[in-house]
Amino acid sequence: MKRIYLDHAAATPMDQRVTEAMDPFWYENFGNAGGLYREGRTAKEAMDAARKEIAHTIGARPDEIIFTSGGTESDNLAIFGTARRATASSTSDVEFPKTSDVFPAIARPHIITTRFEHRAVLGPCELLEKGGFEVTYLEVGNNGIINPEDVKKALRSETILVSIMYANNEIGTIQPIAKIGKIIKEFNENNAAGRSHKTYFHTDACQAAGYLDLNVQNLGVDLMSINGSKIYGPKGIGFLYKRSGVKIKPQMVGGGQELRMRSGTENIPLIAGLSKALKIAQEEKNTESKRLTELRDYFISEMMRRVPRVVLNGDAERRLPNNINVSILGIEGEALLLYLDSLGIACGTGSACTSESLEPSHVILALGKPYEFAHSSIRFTLGRSTKKEDLEYVLEKLPGVVEWLRVVSPITIKTAHNYFRKTEQLCPEK
């Protein structure tokens, strides 16, 4: 059976050009970049070249790129690293002294994030809350877009970090990162007197990397997380951009690699692959985004025409060109996913990192929608291999599967009707 893969937000296949860039470093140039002999020097030269290429691609300096194991580690390093800087003395890289011993002006360091961040951001914030930090979770509009003015209102002298994702991993909505960056910059400039710290701005750009501008100067970010598995690169590799002058504490100590920010022997094949994948993604983003936007909009319109009671989650325009997240009311998303899989169609119900959980999507709930909408959400994310005939096959199979599941599903659509009446939206009927 032919497989149609529509879960590119979870993982992408390796680009052949990326594979070729990695090949020399598996067997031939396999040295440790810390070695002074020729094999080590060759590895270090390759790593330095990759770091330089990545920095050029995002408008940064090579010494502002820290290689990590992926997006989750990059997010954790940004958040915990900033938090530890606010609570650790200059002589300690490990301990967590009392905040008042170091910065008396910060009784409770403050972090701002949103309710629909990836769990790699929400998890660290929740742990820091338990450790005495204060966290403001900004609400998002029902269109899945953050209001920059809400960030401005939440800022205060104790704020050490704002972390807002560039594009949401479930519903694909694109956030006004550049506007938020300007607000934070102005806040720092206007409140410099008497403050022992600046407010840093971090964005998780893992989903955005293949489609949006990543120039850190344009975005105004201090910290930015990227991973390879979302841009047709290798899994298990990513990086954290850390603006020069931004001070964070390392989370892994040992040999002092990565500018003493992330110890451990560098994975040269994966680093080379990440560099190549990011370069290709940014060079081809305009052409690919245009192609995928046309496919995305066609699929959404046809699905809503052929299947009754379908609701698009997130703004229809300000979303990634490959993202289609809908709630198909009256069914369970997991059941639909499994039936489609049996027909050769792979898609997702939310974040791949939480796919084993039966909990409803926190992203859909953050939009103010009922639990039934979260349980019935399904995500189709297109990619470089996606063709119109693939989508036609899905559109051919989808109505029958949905009709059958609605017959056997225990989910009631009463809540859905109530929601539409409340929000003055019409619920289409067959």
Image (cartoon, grey):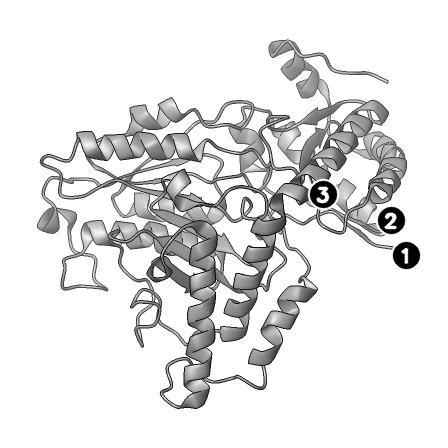
Dot 1 and dot 2 residues touching (CB under 8 Å): yes
The three-letter code of the residue at mark 1 reads Met
Residue, disc 3 = 334
Residue 111 can be seen, yes or no? yes
Which of marks 3 and 1 precedes in the sequence?
1
- Where residue 321 sits: x, y (%)? 65, 37
Report crowding for label 3: few under 14, some 14 to 19, many 20 or more residues within 10 A (C-alpha). some
Which of marks 2 and 3 precedes in the sequence?
3
Residue situated in front as seen by the camera: 279 or 387: 279
The three-letter code of the residue at mark 3 reads Glu
Dot 3 and dot 2 residues touching (CB under 8 Å): no
Residue, disc 2 = 343
| Residue that appears at 48% across and 73% down | 267
- Where residue 246 sits: x, y (%)? 26, 51
Q: Which mark is residue 1?
A: 1
Q: Is residue 287 left or right of residue 148?
A: right
Position of residue 175 relative to residue 74, above or below, is above
The quadrant of the picture occupied by the N terminus is bottom right
Q: CA distance from mark 1 to mark 3?
A: 21 Å
Q: Is residue 111 left or right of residue 173?
A: left
Query: Could you say whether the residue bearing mark 1 is in a helix, strand or loop?
Result: loop
The three-letter code of the residue at mark 2 reads Leu
